[in-house]
Image: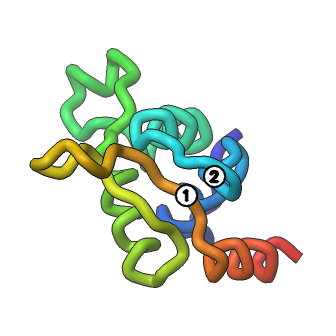
Amino acid sequence: MPIGGGLSNVDVVLYVLHKLGGMSKKLHTELIAWEAYNLSEERFCWSLLEFRKRKFPDKTTVRYALESAKKQKFVKGRAGRDKGGGESEGWQFTSAGIKWFFERSE
């Protein structure tokens, strides 16, 4: 199902986060990237044709959308691990993000 042009990458990624259960658990960036790619291949694929042909999702595009959502306080989390190995990879909605999501989906 292609995603229309009226939605931003943040909108798509937050929809995916919701679809995968991100209101109640942390989800890995790669999982979110794969699902976003399946919804909108053109938006979330690699730029180079040789990799587009291989059907690779672009994790960086998704990470940027998640970081943007984090700045807006819609999600919490991170990509990768911190240097000390403490906080691990994953993204989850904040209470403000849950409110935003349901206001937008009405």
Residue visible at 49% across and 34% down in the picture: 31
* Left or right for 102, reference 70: right
Residue linked to disc 2: 22
**Residue 28, quarter of the rendered image:** top left
Residue visible at 39% across and 51% down in the picture: 62
Q: Can residue 16 be seen in this view?
A: no
In the rendered structure, find residue 48 and report the number of the disc placed on it. none
Residue 74: percent from the left, percent from the top?
54, 75
Q: Is mark 2 on a helix, strand or loop?
A: loop
Point out the image quarter for the N terminus. Answer: top right
- Please name whichever residue, 22 or 88, is drawn nearer the observer in this view of the structure: 88
- Mark 1 and mark 2 residues within 8 Å of each other at the beta carbon: yes
Q: Is residue 58 visible?
A: yes
The numbered mark, 1 or 2, whose residue comes first in the sequence reads 2
In the rendered image, the vertical position of residue 16 relative to residue 53, given as above or below: below
Q: Is mark 1 on a helix, strand or loop?
A: strand
In the rendered structure, find residue 92 and report the number of the disc placed on it. 1
In the rendered image, the vertical position of residue 103 relative to residue 23, given as above or below: below
**Residue 99, quarter of the rendered image:** bottom right
Residue visible at 44% across and 43% down in the picture: 42
- Please name whichever residue, 63 or 43, is drawn nearer the observer in this view of the structure: 63
Q: How many labels does the image show?
A: 2
Q: Residue furthest right?
A: 106
Residue 75: percent from the left, percent from the top?
51, 68
Q: Which residue lies furthest to the left in this view?
A: 83
Mark 1: few/some/many CA within 10 Å (<14, 14-19, 20+): many
In space, the residues marked 1 and 2 are separated at their CA atoms by 5 Å
Mark 2: few/some/many CA within 10 Å (<14, 14-19, 20+): many
Residue 10: percent from the left, percent from the top?
50, 66
- Please name whichever residue, 27 or 14, is drawn nearer the observer in this view of the structure: 27
**Amino acid type, mark 2:** Gly
